[in-house]
Image (spheres, grey):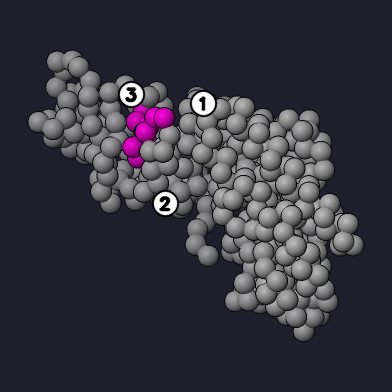
Amino acid sequence: MNPLAELETPVLLLDEARMDRNIARMQSRMDALGVRFRPHAKTSKCPAVVQRQLAAGARGITVSTLKEAERFFAAGVQDILYAVAIVPGKFDHALRLCRQGLQLTLLVESVAAAQQLSQFGAAHGQVFDVLIEVDTDGHRSGIAPGDPLLLDIAAALQGGARCKGVMTHAGSSYDLRTPEALQAMAEQERAGCVAAAQGLRAAGHACEVVSVGSTPTALSARDLAGVTEVRAGVYVFFDLVMAGVGVCTPGDIALSVLCTVIGHRPEAGWVITDGGWMAMSRDRGTARQDHDHGYGLVCDADGAPIAGLRFDSANQEHGVLQWTGYDSLPLAERFPLGAQLRIVPNHACATGAQHPAYVVLPAAGGSAPLQRWERFSGW
């Protein structure tokens, strides 16, 4: 009997074989480029997944919350970069983790944050390791590589904090579509972060870490001279946005949401499932790409895409799939009540955040039992 048929839906499925191939692909590329790889664990929020990445050769991880740092440290990860600018309200939490023995690196992007963290560290007998965030593409936050403010921030990191290096994230790479554009962005990211590091060193500041990364640029870079480490996260599962960017195919995507047909509206051509936006998230990232997948790519229970069935509308617990196929078979016969479907997500991080665990489709296939890997959420 198909073990998926016994699952109460909606449920998040993880294809173990695809995940393992994705991990091996990225790690082998980083090894070939001669850089340390520090995967971003915000995508999986799952110790079992991170252990696979570390076993493949990753050295440390990146996180986006201190809760992630705490949970992964408890699971045995010793070296963690918290890659969101630290604020005073989180200083105590960071201090607790450092005192417990975690090798924690923090991030700042302003003189005020550098001063406040340095003062806090000095007052509590702690010297925090700190990276300065550099903006190499105007995407979100950080200091431009040539901005004199970079030196002011580094100068403020003294006493209770030390400048360990610089970090950037080429988030605008998600908007690109061609290999040439992705390669150019990867070089822009590399060159900008290396220039920032050189400027700091020329002014007498230590800068041992030069950290860059996003999944598209990590998979597109041809030269990483001057870079010491790369970060990437969504590569471990991939998703439809990454397929639209061109760094994977739908066949590489390791996540899907299993749902069940619960009703029909034949006059409208609707197939109703129990997988609404609470199961998929509201992320419509592919709407900005050449092919809009709505709330996700609809597949049969085995994971094969279904031509003519689109996931264009969703309520909280209802997925409304639109049938545009042309045949005489009644809708309720083609997609009968109780039939299972799989939806491939637009954004793996957002869809994963909707679920408490992954049901793992084993790499060996066949009749091997399904596993359940717990994940966590929140802050």
Tell me the residue that label 1 is attached to.
Answer: 249
Residue drawn at x 78%, y 49% as measured from the top left: 195
Q: Point out residue 250 in the picture as x, y percentages from the top left corner.
A: 48, 27
Work out whether residue 215 can be spotted: yes
Q: Nearer the viewer, residue 240 or 7?
A: 240
Question: Which mark is on residue 127?
Answer: none
**Residue stretch in magenta:** 290-299
- Nearer the viewer's eye, disc 2 or disc 1? 1
- Identified by mark 3, the residue type is Ile
Work out whether residue 104 can be spotted: no
Specify few, some or many for label 3: CA neighbours under 10 Å numbering under 14, 14-19, or 20 or more: some
Q: CA distance from mark 1 to mark 3?
A: 16 Å
Residue drawn at x 75%, y 68% as measured from the top left: 153
Tell me the residue that label 3 is attached to.
Answer: 306
Q: Is residue 295 magenta?
A: yes
Q: Are marks 2 and 1 in contact (CB under 8 Å)?
A: no
- The mark nearer the N terminus, 2 or 1, is 1
Q: Residue furthest top?
A: 327
Q: Point out residue 19 in the picture as x, y percentages from the top left corner.
A: 58, 34
